[in-house]
Image: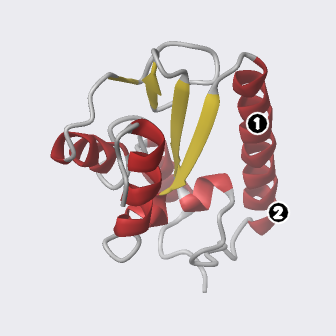
Amino acid sequence: MSDVFDKKARSEIMRAVKSKNTRSTELAMIALFKENHITGWRHSYNVKGHPDFVFLKKRIAIFVDGCFWHGHDCRNTRPADNAEYWAKKRERNIQRDKETTERFEKRGWTVVRIWECELKKKNLPETKRRLLSLLCSDYNP
């Protein structure tokens, strides 16, 4: 299926995509933290690698990755137009994510990567269980 927008319009749309405070990901995580009384987190902490959330005392870095941008095939979404460009872009993102994870782990941090689809209603209970077991020492499902 070809794009319904011309190249200029698509470029404007993609330029408007923000990497912070995205409703489907980071704000959903904040809501999950607040609903479960999870404290001690910092949002968009300014450190090389740019985790979405950090728990400084526990040395936990949480990255909330968009499925399309970071190479998760949950929806198997692949643009037909300019396919080679998008494949290379996703591969660069995947490689950068691996390097970032290694950098944090070498410093003694625990890295958690959460896919965008894991914050959807049907997957949220498992995501919540995983986070609570990691973040709350007294959590016992």
Query: Residue at the spot x=36%, y=66% of the render?
Result: 124
Q: How many marks?
A: 2
Q: Amino acid at mark 1?
A: Arg
Q: 38 above or below 25?
A: above
To which quarter of the image does residue 97 belong? top right
Q: 1 above or below 32?
A: below
Q: Which residue is mark 1?
A: 96
Query: Residue at the spot x=33%, y=46% of the render?
Result: 29
Density class for disc 2 (Cα within 10 Å; few <14, some 14-19, many ≥20) is: few
* Mark found first going from the N terminus, 2 or 1: 2
Front-most of 80 and 134? 134
In the rendered structure, the answer to whether residue 14 lies left or right of residue 2 reads left
Q: Amino acid at mark 2?
A: Glu
Front-most of 6 and 21? 21
In the rendered structure, the answer to whether residue 106 lies left or right of residue 81 reads right
SS at badge 1 = helix
Query: Residue at the spot x=74%, y=50% of the render?
Result: 89
In the rendered structure, the answer to whether residue 45 lies left or right of residue 30 reads right
- Coloration mode: secondary structure
Could you tell me if the residues under marks 2 and 1 are in contact, i.e. CB atoms within 8 Å?
no
Q: Can you give x and y, in whole percent of width and height, for residue 57 in the image? A: 45, 15
Of labels 2 and 1, the one closer to you: 1
Q: Can you give x and y, in whole percent of width and height, for residue 103 in the image? A: 76, 23
Q: Can you give x and y, in whole percent of width and height, for residue 32 in the image? A: 26, 48
Q: Quadrant of the C terminus?
A: bottom left
Q: Which residue is mark 2?
A: 84
